Image (cartoon, grey):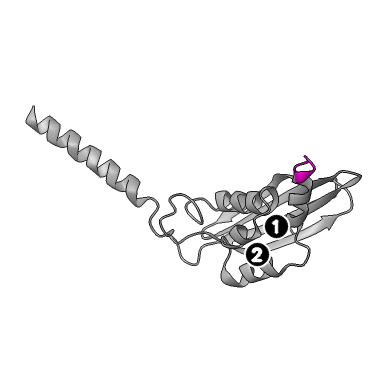
Amino acid sequence: MKLRNVVTGTLALTLLFFAGCSGEGDGGKGAGAGAGDPLAVANQFMDLYYHKANIKEAAALAIPEMAEKILAAPGAPAGDASKEKDAGQEISYTLKEKSQEGVHSYALYTIVIPRKDAEPIYKTAALFVDQAKAGEAWKITLFDEKTQSTPHEETTRR
């Protein structure tokens, strides 16, 4: 009877220990910025940049060089996002393509920005999400956004 309690207690403590260690290396933010899955990081970036119009937090998911470019972008579309959100319209984005090989990952999104008194704006956004070394946080290493003339233009890697 005592052995069973010891084994059960040891198992419970081990699981608790591993659950507590899962957020290690991300500054105590749990499963947030850069942790785990590169697609989750790409989705988090898209949500921050387009839905929440929070360029600063979106840039925090990128390597320093890319973060500078994101923050310095003139007329960032995230500004459009906040205007359209105020008008009761929400930007939508869809994952069109993804790939991952080792510490390198790629995601391609199509974006529709509705406008109150005009045709919607159609865009594509390509994100490269990489790890400097296996086991480190995933970071945006490239963010490339292009405006499309129609919603049906082919959107594949070149």
- Dot 2: element: strand
Which of the numbered marks, if any, corresponds to residue 148?
Answer: none
Residue 44 point in image, percent of width and height: 59, 50
Disc 2 or 1, which lies upstream in sequence?
Answer: 1
Say which residue appears at 13% left-offset and 36% top-offset. Answer: 6
Please say whether residue 132 is one of the residues in the magenta stretch: no
Residue 116 point in image, percent of width and height: 87, 43
As rendered, which of 148 and 76 lies closer to the eye?
76
Please say if 28 is above or below 74.
above
| Type of amino acid under label 1 | Ala
- Dot 1: element: strand
Q: Is residue 58 visible?
A: yes
Q: Quadrant of the N terminus?
A: top left
Query: Which residue is farthest left?
Result: 2
Query: Which residue is farthest top?
Result: 1
Q: Badge 2 is on which residue?
A: 142
Q: Badge 1 is on which residue?
A: 126
Say which residue appears at 78% left-offset and 41% top-offset. Answer: 89
Mark 2, residues whose alpha carbon is within 10 Å: few (<14), some, or many (≥20)? many
Query: Which residue is farthest front?
Result: 86
| Type of amino acid under label 2 | Leu
Say which residue appears at 46% left-offset and 66% top-offset. Answer: 133
As rendered, which of 44 and 89 lies closer to the eye?
89
Discs 2, 1 touching: Cβ within 8 Å: yes
Say which residue appears at 22% left-offset and 38% top-offset. Answer: 11
Mark 1, residues whose alpha carbon is within 10 Å: few (<14), some, or many (≥20)? many
Q: Quadrant of the C terminus?
A: bottom right
Residue 68 point in image, percent of width and height: 64, 71
Distance from Cα at disc 2 to Cα at disc 1:
8 Å
Please say if 20 is above or below 62.
above
Residue range of the region highlighted in magenta in the rendering: 86-90
Taking the image as shown, residue 137 lies to the left or right of residue 158, namely left
